[in-house]
Image (tube, rainbow, N blue to C red):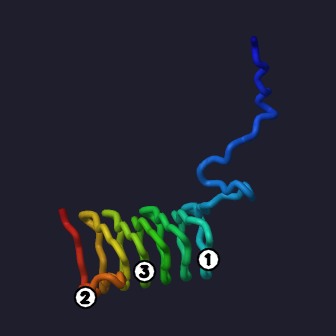
Amino acid sequence: MFQRKTPIASRAVQPSRGTTEAMGSPTFSVLAADLAVKGNLTAQADLHIDGRVEGDITCAALVQGEASEIHGEIRADSARIAGTVRGTLTVGDLVVQRAARIHGDVHYDTITIEQGAVVDGRLSQRSAQAAPAQIEGSATVVG
């Protein structure tokens, strides 16, 4: 009539978002605002960068904080840029937030640029299905 419940300590813990089942390791890495890195970063995981990076970054997805600075090339499947970038971006799905300042060429499949963002460089769509659209010079989106 009554079923005995499994004690909490012996219950299987379900992996939360941000962990892999097999290893229990994070699928994202965070570089805090007080961290400065000189050198290239390569990650299978997603990266959230609030600090300063001088070097190239390759990852699955990148989220950049507003106070962050990246000096180098960025390659990612997706990126949300909110800080300063000096270098070339090659990103599948790119969101350039209002606080972003990009100084370099941008190659993308899809792009969203919020009002107030600054892009100083060439924008080129890298999709093989569509003819490449290229815009040269500076673009400031003002609302």
In this picture, residue 127 sits left or right of residue 131: right
**Looking at the picture, how far across and down is residue 58, in whole percent?**
55, 77
Q: Earlier in the sequence, mark 2 or mark 3?
A: 3
Quarter where residue 8 is shown: top right
In this picture, residue 4 sits left or right of residue 119: right
Q: Are marks 2 and 1 in contact (CB under 8 Å)?
A: no
Tag 3: Cα neighbours inside 10 Å, few (<14), some, or many (≥20)?
Answer: many
Q: Amino acid at mark 1?
A: Thr
In this picture, residue 115 sits left or right of residue 109: left
Quarter where residue 23 is shown: bottom right
Quarter where residue 92 is shown: bottom left
> Residue at coordinates 54% horizontally, 62% vertically from top-left?
33
How far is mark 2 from mark 1, CA to CA? 29 Å
Furthest toward the front, the residue is: 1
Q: Amino acid at mark 2?
A: Glu
**Looking at the rendered structure, which numbered label has been put on residue 42?**
1
**Looking at the picture, how far across and down is residue 6, in whole percent?**
78, 27
How far is mark 2 from mark 3, CA to CA? 15 Å
**Looking at the rendered structure, which numbered label has been put on residue 133?**
none
**Looking at the rendered structure, which numbered label has been put on residue 89?**
3
How far is mark 1 from mark 3, CA to CA? 15 Å
Q: Earlier in the sequence, mark 2 or mark 1?
A: 1
Q: Could you tell me which secondary element the residue under label 2 belongs to?
A: loop
Furthest toward the top, the residue is: 1
Task: Give the position of the N terminus as an image quadrant.
Answer: top right
**Looking at the picture, how far across and down is residue 129, in whole percent?**
32, 82
The residue at which mark 2 appears reads as: 136
**Looking at the picture, how far across and down is residue 68, in whole percent?**
47, 67
Q: Amino acid at mark 3?
A: Leu
